[in-house]
Image: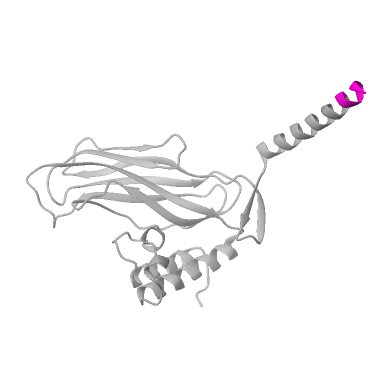
Amino acid sequence: MNKKKGIIIGVVLFVLAVVVGYALFSDTLTINGTATAKGKFDMEISSAQITSEVGSTGATAQVSSDKNTLTIDIPKLEYPGAYVEVTYKIKNAGTIPALYDSYDITGETDRIKSQFNIIHMFYEPEDETTETIRIYWDSNNNTEEEESTTITFKLNYVQTNDKESACANLLEKAKMVEECSAYLRPESDCPINNFDLNHDGFVDFSDTTFWEEGAIRIGCQLN
């Protein structure tokens, strides 16, 4: 009896080991509950560097250990209009196509703001592109004291099946942004960190253009 139990337990442990081992090497992701793709989903910031400082000294740009977040530390902005520009690279290090979804940014104030355009939205595996972000002291908000700040910036991506799926998503986003701009959607359906691609603080018709340009850039046909 004990021998039979031992055999059964051994078989169960073997099956569990196979299942766990497979899970370590294969990840199944679901898109909208209708399609699946097996592989590795891994969008990352592959590098970042300070490319310009005006009225600033000693700024640094550091990528987090998980390669998901960019931290820009600016110890001194000397006057209104001073800025730091950072160039960073985004790479699809996985095996699944990815599509831009939204961004998260912290550290901005009434005086210290950031400016960027999300240019590249669709990434095939191994694709790598260059983007920029500028942190600046708003010249309309003056003070006699020097300013300092630490900005954290993260771009969020979602899985997509292929370029055709990406086109459908981008064009749908452009339509939603257009409706937001025309006040045809409630404000709660128009989150800035999803739709405001030029980060000017508003979801307006200029953002519709950015979404459409993103679609055109990868060969989508506008309706």
Which residue shows up at 49% across the image and 46% down it?
91
Between 66 and 107, the one lying in front of the other is 107
Between 211 and 153, the one lying in front of the other is 153
Between 94 and 6, the one lying in front of the other is 6
Is residue 139 covered in magenta?
A: no
Q: How is the image coloured?
A: one colour
> Residue 142, image x and y in percent?
10, 52
Q: 25 above or below 101? A: above
> Residue 149, image x and y in percent?
23, 42
Chief secondary structure of the magenta portion:
helix
In this rendering, the count of numbered labels is: 0
Residue that sits furthest to the front in the current view: 1
Residue range corresponding to the magenta coloring: 1-6
Which residue shows up at 60% across the image and 61% down it?
32
Placement of the N terminus among the 4 image quadrants = top right
Q: 180 above or below 3? A: below
Locate residue 8 relative to residue 86 in the image: left or right: right
Which residue shows up at 32% across the image and 50% down it?
133
Locate residue 37 relative to residue 67 in the image: left or right: right
